[in-house]
Image (cartoon, coloured by chain):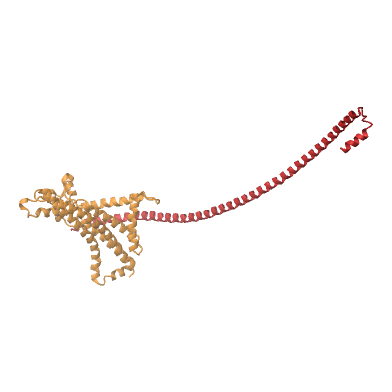
Amino acid sequence: MAEKNVIDPSNASDLTPTSDYISHHLTNLTYGWCEKSESWGFAYHQQTIFPESPCKVSEMGFWAFHVDTIFMSSILGVIFFGFFGLAIRAAKTGVPGKIQNFAEYVFEFISNAVSSNFHGSSKIIGPLAFTSCVWILAWNLMDLLPVELTNFAGVAGSGFDYFKVLPTADVNAPLALALVVMFFVTYYTIANHGLGGFLKEFINPIELVGYFSKHVALALRLYGNLFAGEMIFILIGIMFGQFLMSFGQTLWFFPGLIMNLAWALFHILIIALQAYIFMMLTIAYINLACAKH
Amino acid sequence: MNVNATFFAELLAFSIFIFITYRYLWPSFSSILDSRREEISKGLEAASESQKKLEEAEDASRKMIEDAKNEASSLINQAGSRGDQIVEEAKTQATEEQLKIKSAAEADIEQNVTKAKENLKQEVSSLVLAGAAKILEKEVDAESNKQIIDDLIKEL
């Protein structure tokens, strides 16, 4: 928010506004259980539309929902999978149109990645790879929206002062994906090697650590990359903030503009790459689970 | 980085999207691509078949053209020889006709000549008689001198 970002020229060494700005950008719109008032509600001072609870985000326990993450991820899923659904509904076996061509290209790309890296027989791995790749890509693309966009929306009277558009930068979302992958890895290990074969892997207890860390790393790799990308956008955004608040003091506007552009261009690579890596690792893990030792 | 109940919501959303992809998107994409693959292979097969047919048709047409050429040349030869024959026949016919006309004309001339001779003899005999009468100053009796006159005529 703009007013949080004011830097008093007489006290330039005070970094509190800057850190406030950063933490504001990293706080999700949260709806949860407040111990203090023993009620459900949005976190303190996050929005002005719905009734709010006296708890801040940090005071809410486990039973809290990041409304922005859930909303953005679901709506992106509906849009992207809806796009593929509409493309296939209008599809014909003859010469395909442009949209159908694109949808088929994406499908074939993922389908080839599956068939060249997965040697077992599974009906779920194709859809799993497709869903994770497309969905993560949709999430990550949100990183290219300006970091201030939702805050401007808040200032303009949308009622929501806190709204993170990037679901990947909320660790819950990648963790949920990784857990699903872990579920399928476990399922296919047991299906192919039996429960005994699955348990035999953990004769050495260190293997158990490896088993869990493998999947946690899958989630954190995605989360970390996108979180860091978001963070850098925020840091660049502070330069704008300084410019906007004290025109005479700094001229960070143009370096900020150039850096924002440069980082956005570079970030496009990370956006696509992380979605691809997650998909490939999913395929590789399940392939490993199906492989005969 | 705070893990909370959002995790379950994301889990649910992911499961739903996987189910949708598994149930609807993936099979329909697979089926449409499979049917296209089939269509393409059929098309390629049809193309090679029609290529073969085209070659066959080309062979047949080439053969037909060759036959037609042969026939045409034989016809031309035939026509030429027939023409020669007709010319030859016409020539012999013309020659015959010519000979016939010529002989007829000759016979006619002969006849005319004979007739003229006869007429001339008559004339001459009457002239002789008239001359003799003049010389003898009397009528020569033609009847009585018939023998002499006839002898004269014969000598002419």
Which residue lies most toward the left here?
A: A10
Q: Is residue A130 left or right of residue B86?
A: left
Q: Residue A119 or B116: which is nearer the viewer?
A: B116
Which chain can be seen in orange? A
Which residue lies most toward the bottom here?
A: A204
Q: Is residue A60 left or right of residue B11?
A: left
Which residue lies most toward the top here?
A: B138
Which chain can be seen in red? B
Is residue A170 at all visible to an observer of this figure?
A: no
Residue A1: x percent and y percent? 14, 49
| Number of numbered markers | 0
Q: Quadrant of the C terminus of chain A?
A: bottom left
Residue B78: x percent and y percent? 64, 50
Q: Residue B65 or B46: which is nearer the viewer?
A: B65
Check the image and report above or below for B138 versus B92: above
* Picture quadrant where residue B108 is located: top right
Check the image and report above or below for A277 versus A95: below
Q: Residue B84 or A1: which is nearer the viewer?
A: B84
Residue A154: x percent and y percent? 17, 47
Q: Residue A64 or A136: which is nearer the viewer?
A: A136
Residue visible at 11% across and 48% down in the picture:
A245
Residue B95: x percent and y percent? 72, 45
Is residue B98 at all visible to an observer of this figure?
A: yes
Q: Is residue B124 left or right of residue B95?
A: right
Q: Is residue B30 left or right of residue B144?
A: left
